[in-house]
Amino acid sequence: MTERPAVQRLANDHALAASNPTPAVHLRDAGLTFGDRTLWDHLSLDIAPGEFVAVLGPNGAGKTSLLRVLLGMQKLTTGSVTVDGRPVNRGSRRIGYVPQQRNFDPTLPVRARDLVSFGVDGHRWGIPLPSRSRTAAVNRALAQVGATRYADAPVGMLSGGEQQRLRIAQALVTDPSVLLCDEPLLSLDLAHQQAVADLIDKRRKEFDTAVVFVTHEINPILPMVDRVLYLVDGRFRIGAPDEVMTSSVLSELYGAPIDVLHAGDQIVVLGTDHHAHHGEHDVVKAIP
Ligand SMILES: Nc1ncnc2c1ncn2[C@@H]1O[C@H](COP(=O)(O)OP(=O)(O)OP(=O)(O)O)[C@@H](O)[C@H]1O
């Protein structure tokens, strides 16, 4: 087969982009206020299919609230939001959600495959899938996260990393176009953090699933992040990691001096505990 000339390739790529203009997530002039506290406003953001967006910021900045808006669980105060070009609605199959990690009770009488199966229709409206399709979807999701081996084990007996794979399988079982992750690496060791992050990255590359990933720790996902949305006290910045994770941008956002160091392939953010938020000490490593 002959190689297409570059000009033709470019033209085709543009035609392809034009034929699929719908962003996976579209926020326009969005604002969220509770009482007299505005978490964020005038937030406009289009997330493309397959794009990986990390959402960072101190405790209480409104990261989880943003996910709740995308899940249809929280109404915007101002502005608009669509997912896949349609208004968000609670329980949509187009959205997969990996909640903050908590370990399951060791005595919970639920097998791994049952947990994944809850994601098929769980709280969702509509006609339930026939059982053969359900089993196939569950098996597919278990295989995608490499959890087939312990599919019939009680979830409470599995390790934190294994449980987290199952939460991802549960989120993927409806084949969503957007995957929302709320600190999915919390309390995992480095090897498991890497494995879970790689799984999510593989999914978005193979299926063009957009990823919105709330985290306090950017380093484990740095190689896969396309853009960062950094929220601080009603202010925000959106851009590539090397545009946002700089001393000047973070100092401006926090309204206080923040030093951002690049050490090898890691980002280290230094600030006071008050401003830096997640560390126990004055010097905080890798703030989000
Ligand atoms: N329904 C609500 N009514 C009133 N206040 C709320 C509501 N939901 C969230 N908040 C407040 O909004 C703020 C942001 O909460 P959110 O959970 O979005 O923060 P976050 O950035 O995810 O924080 P963390 O990093 O600690 O998880 C918090 O102060 C929270 O108490």
Image: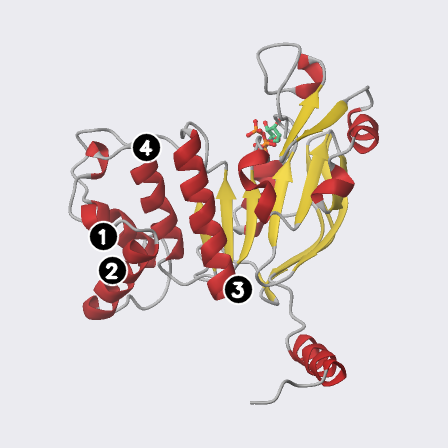
Please report whichever mark, 2 or 3, sits nearer to the chain's N-terminal start.
2
**Is 18 above or below relative to 29?**
below
Specify how the rendered protein is coloured: secondary structure
Which residue is the site of mark 3? 208
Which amino acid does the dot numbered 3 rest on? Asp
Ligand 1 sits in quadrant = top right
Mark 1 to mark 3: distance in Å?
23 Å
Mark 2 to mark 4: distance in Å?
21 Å
Asked if the residues shown at circle 3 and circle 4 are in contact, with their CB atoms under 8 angstroms apart, the answer is no
Which amino acid does the dot numbered 1 rest on? Thr
Asked if the residues shown at circle 2 and circle 1 are in contact, with their CB atoms under 8 angstroms apart, the answer is yes
Which amino acid does the dot numbered 4 rest on? Gly
x and y percentages locating residue 22 in the rendered image: 64, 70
**At 66% from the left edge and 86% from the top edge, which residue is drawn?**
4
Which residue is the site of mark 2? 139
Residue 177 seen in render:
no
x and y percentages locating residue 109 in the rendered image: 16, 38
Please report whichever mark, 2 or 1, sits nearer to the chain's N-terminal start.
2
Please report whichever mark, 2 or 4, sits nearer to the chain's N-terminal start.
2
